[in-house]
Image (cartoon, grey):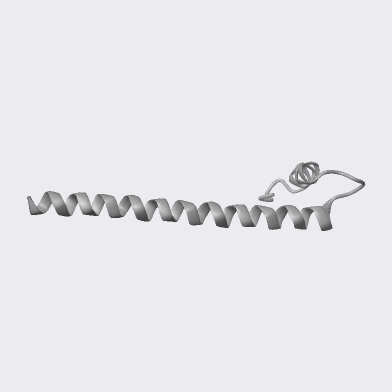
Amino acid sequence: MAKSKLVTANRNLAKKVTSAFHKIEDTVVGSYTKIEDEFVDRYLTKDNETVEEAKKRLKQEHPSSKL
């Protein structure tokens, strides 16, 4: 009986930790994407192109880039 309670408690804890990690990860990635888009918009766009167009152009010019 004690083992099953420990196993259940451990699984519940693992679910909570994993859920918290995913929330933090989503927040960090979302914030990074906003910063990246703002940087591309300010410094890397040319002649009224959109951020997405600039990212595509940069990816073609620099295939190893992560944009």
| Side of 44 relative to 23 (left or right) | right
Expressed as whole percent of the image width and height from the top left, the position of residue 60 reads: 76, 42
Q: Is residue 25 left or right of residue 35?
A: left
Picture mark count? 0
Provide residue 46's location: percent of width, then percent of height: 89, 49
> What residue appears at the point 31 percent right and 53 percent down from the top-left corner?
14
- Spot the residue most to the right: 47
Question: In this view of the protein, which residue sits in the foreground, 6 or 37?
Answer: 6
Toward the viewer: 56 or 26? 26
Q: Position of residue 35 (x, y in %)?
A: 70, 58
Name the spot of residue 54 as percent of width and height, x first. 80, 46
Q: Is residue 61 left or right of residue 29?
A: right
Q: In the orientation shown, which residue stands out farthest toward the left?
A: 1
The residue at the point 76 percent across, 58 percent down is 39
Q: What residue lies at 46% left-to-right and 51% top-to-bottom? A: 22
x 20%, y 49%: residue:
8
Q: Is residue 51 left or right of residue 27?
A: right
